[in-house]
Amino acid sequence: MSWQDEIDEIKQRRDLAKQQGGEEGVAKHHAKGRQTIRERIGGLLDANSFDETGEGSGVPEYDEAGKLVDFQPANFVLGFGKIAGRKVIVGGEDFTVKGGSPNPAGLRKSVYAEQLALQYKLPLIRLHEGGGGSVGGTGQEKNHRPLGDPVFATSRFVPLAQTLGAVPVATAALGPVAGLPAARLVASHFSVMTENAAVLIAGPQVVKRALGHDLTKEQLGGPAVHLKSGAIDNLAVDEADALAQIKRFLSFVPDNAWMRPASLAPEDQIDRCEDSLATIVPKNRRQPFQMRKIIDAVVDKHMQGSSFFEMSRKYGPSLITGLARMNGHSVGVIGNDCMYYAGAMTAAAAQKLRRFVDFCNSFHLPIISFVDEPGFMIGLDSEAAGTIRHGTAAISAVLQSRVPWASVQVQKAFGVAAQAHFGPDGYVLVWPSAASGALPVEGGVAVAFAREIAAAADPAARQKELEDMLAATQSPFPRAEGFSVHEIIDPRETRPKLINWLDAALAAQTDAPGPYMTTMRP
Amino acid sequence: MVHENFGMGWRMSVDVKTEVAGQVWKIVAQIGDQLAADDVILILESMKMEIPITAPKPGKLAKLHVIEQDIVGEEQLIATLEAE
């Protein structure tokens, strides 16, 4: 007696499961320029490291003799794997089976992805392509079983919410993603979408019927919409780029909230002082400069370029957020982009900042802030967007932050919004180009001295005189004299100064790391 | 980006849009100028700053859709380049 027949059937089932939606379905998928979920997982993970979970789940089909003839696999593929030698959980919808709309086993496996990541405290990567439930249901109803989940069952959204505080979650939209998968897509710390992906709450037909708007999938939820809406962080030129960006993101974060990020062997010199920093900020404050060039000059170099990995560039673009390395240590980087409304804090920029600061705190990433803040964005659009509430919430997030924080004041730090760039017990360096105060001279003088200017013989000359006088009081030298900043520095010294600070700040972290909790915010 | 006939065969027409609202302060390039990527086409005044609108890729400046002093909004079409 042997179990050979059963062993053969296990093999047969596995082979059938690997056929996914069948030859035709896979060919159709490839014709659209898309990879199957198994190809994607293969491209993401270290070679031969995929250890699948629930490979045998699905719906078998038998002939009259009771012999297995076909097997529709669960259309969510899930398992353990390795990226650069680190263990991760990876999963994604199989679009070739029912367009990724969950079949019963697929739904169970997809919901289990978060539980696995929570249980084993491992980073979670979800590669999404598929729809949500269909009006016709999942097919489970035909089996005369009780409908729905038991009333006492834990909602599948509980682990979805919990993962963000426990393990890094990175997701990709690699085709149309709608309904539940779209919600899972954005429940992440980093998300990326390809050019041909679309992220939708509901598709074109539903929108047309409900609202009368005739829009394509791409018009409704393509990259042009969702990189700006903030729903998705980054654009990828193709699937390989999307997977590469996920790997890059993961390289900066620890496996979970109970660990600190790994420090790598430095690829760059500590005392590299770039001459460009001495001249990059124009003396004429009306002329903008490229904050990204400053960031790239200060953080570690990486291969041919910079270690700076920008996230959410198109969303709230007056604020730059990203990850980088400083002497091999992983850090979060913030900067104002004065090319966009002088770097003013819009409602979107404030929400982006709050999310980023919470993320850095969740995974113990020190923050380096390059400051050029003119204040909250003004005007009717800004008022109508509730900028004051979002901005105040961002300030609260910054001032409740617990990670080491350094601020380099490159130029402006004005108004209430300036507070959003200086964390508690922070290390504060200022450049000679720095200017601080309640209001930028350019707008403030005309308001504060309106009567005096109007009464002057030559109002324009008087305004200029007052502006020059006040500009002098905004100089960084008196602030250094009064020790209201740690140091006024030659901009070229920024990198060595920050690295010395970071070494001390990291060495002082003697508490065991753990999850980050926050209070209610405005 | 669309393909348009400029009377000299089909070439690629590149829309140049502004990311920010503001006022056209100074037009720097002239129609017919051959621009390199990042060359300045015009300068907007936005939030008291001079924000350059630059060529996204190399090409000849075919059309300007604004004149000095015009108020422009986010995503407004500013210029059209004619690229190879």
Image (cartoon, coloured by chain):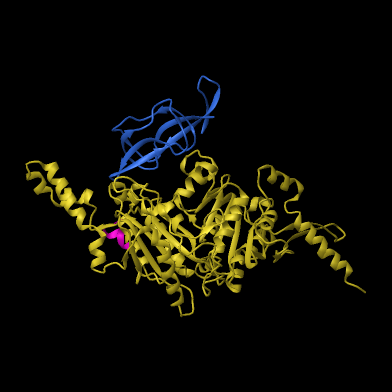
**Residue drawn at (18%, 50%) of the image:** A468
- Front residue of A113 and A224: A224
Quadrant, the N terminus of chain A: bottom right
For residue A460, side relative to residue A300 (left or right) = left
Q: Is residue A417 magenta?
A: yes
In this rendering, does residue B12 appear at all? yes
Quadrant, the C terminus of chain A: bottom left
* Chain identifier, colour yellow: A
* The quadrant where residue B50 appears: top left
* The quadrant where residue B62 appears: top left
Q: Is residue A344 magenta?
A: no
Q: Which stretch appears magenta? A: A412-419
- Front residue of B59 and A224: B59
* Chain identifier, colour blue: B
The relative height of residue A275 versus residue A513 in the rendered view (above or below) is above
Q: Residue extending furthest right?
A: A1
Residue B65 in the image: x percent, y percent? 38, 29
For residue A328, side relative to residue A469 (left or right) = right
How many numbered circles are shown?
A: 0
The relative height of residue A332 versus residue A452 in the rendered view (above or below) is below
**Residue drawn at (55%, 50%) of the image:** A193
Residue A89 in the image: x percent, y percent? 63, 66
For residue A219, side relative to residue A58 (left or right) = left
**Residue drawn at (65%, 58%) of the image:** A44
Residue A205 in the image: x percent, y percent? 54, 43
The relative height of residue A23 versus residue A123 in the rendered view (above or below) is above
